[in-house]
Image (spheres, rainbow, N blue to C red):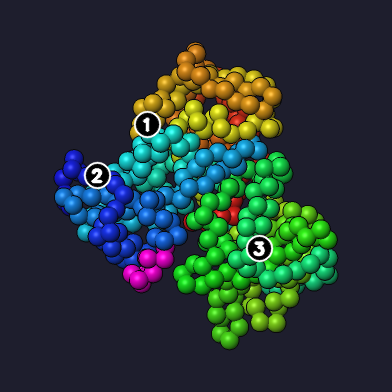
Amino acid sequence: MRGDPRQRQVSCPDPAQRSALAAVLAHAFGFPIEDAAGWFATAGDDNLRVLLSNDEVLAGLMHVPMGTWVGGRSVPTVGIAGVGVRLDARRQGVASDLMTETVLELHRRGVALSSLYASTYALYQAVGFDAAASCHLATVDPRLLPAHGREGQVELLSAANRPEIEAAHRDFYRSGLGEDLHHERGPYLWERTLGVRRGQRALGLCVRDDSGRICGWLSYRPEPAGGRHRVVVQDLFATAPWAAQRVWSAVADMAAMATEIVFATAPTDGMLLALPQPRFEVRLFDLLLLRICDVAAALQARGYRDAPNGAVCFHLHDAQVAANAGAWTLEVEAGVGTLRRGGTPELDLDVRTLASLYAGFASATALQQGGRQLSGDRAAIDRLAGLLRTRSAWTRDMY
């Protein structure tokens, strides 16, 4: 075993430890070690974490600050990326210790939520994460797309218009029009979407209306495919129907050299519904897992735009964060939630089940069928699910 588990600690790495972390992640994810510097720069040194044992780096990860839109409000979230364990330290509880300390750190900081894409579900479920949103990938032949939308003014994606794109995205969601479980992107996600990733800058364009306001955009990175290329879309977005048509026309204009277009989406994505005769293949790519790190912050920061007025008392189990456990009463009035300690519990659930209900990912019945911890008065269970309802739990951001 690599080191005494009692001596393991998680901290922000110094320069030598960052070099060791680069080697761990390069080995774990199969990329050239020199590429780690760019990844770390995008994340920021303050967002790197390493697990140490006897001053050796056994594992590490990155924090990705962002928000998660829930019920029309952005909830403070730290995404987790790049979880890697040194090969000779695997299957020794290192990853579990790393993730447990990560959850505890986020709770101490008052961060409401954490989210990630899991390579090993059992590891993350054991520390309180569970399914919260789907991420689908669609593949479309650009030759089958309509190219009739030509309204607006089009310009190439650039550093100059990036701040306007970021503002347009933020304003759209703040207006209450956006889907739930999408992210209020921070610097890491925006750099991945519009900037440089693995040495390749995103290409694309944006669409302006007659007043000069940006109403849609496309960003992508081409991948060589036998003399032609495959277009991997990073973002495909519009705030108005005419802008969606114009963005799709730009995608159709790639047909001469693009073999296929691949983009993150969902069957209910408005960008897909903008196509007059959709011709595409959609498959489930992954599930976004969510962890409620601070239950009071999570339930009071989110919105309840579709919820009726009401209240419910529940007993929550959390094996990692003792402060989350116990009896809580949630009251919702006029779209605002208040959580207070105490009350007589009407139902019993654990933090994993609460995460899936919080996101509106699955019904209470489905969660019970799936073996999640959820019991008690049926009317109270339905009332909690009704208070936590959301709109279409899916996401397009990957990290």
Local packing at callout 1 (Cα closer than 10 Å; few below 14, some 14-19, many 20+) is many
Look at the image and tell me whether residue 141 can be seen: yes
Q: Is residue 35 magenta?
A: yes
Distance CA(mark 3)–CA(mark 2)? 43 Å
Query: Which segment is the magenta one?
Result: 30-39
Local packing at callout 3 (Cα closer than 10 Å; few below 14, some 14-19, many 20+) is some
Estimate the x, y position of residue 136 in percent, counting from the top left: 59, 56
Residue at figure coordinates x 66%, y 58% from the top left = 165
The answer to which quarter of the image holds residue 236 is: bottom right
Residue located farthest toward the top when viewing the structure as drawn: 344
Above or below 43: residue 302:
above
Which residue is denoted by mark 3 in the rendering?
161
Distance CA(mark 1)–CA(mark 3)? 43 Å
Residue at figure coordinates x 63%, y 65% from the top left = 160
Estimate the x, y position of residue 116 in percent, counting from the top left: 46, 49
Which residue is denoted by mark 2 in the rendering?
9
The answer to which quarter of the image holds residue 333 is: top right
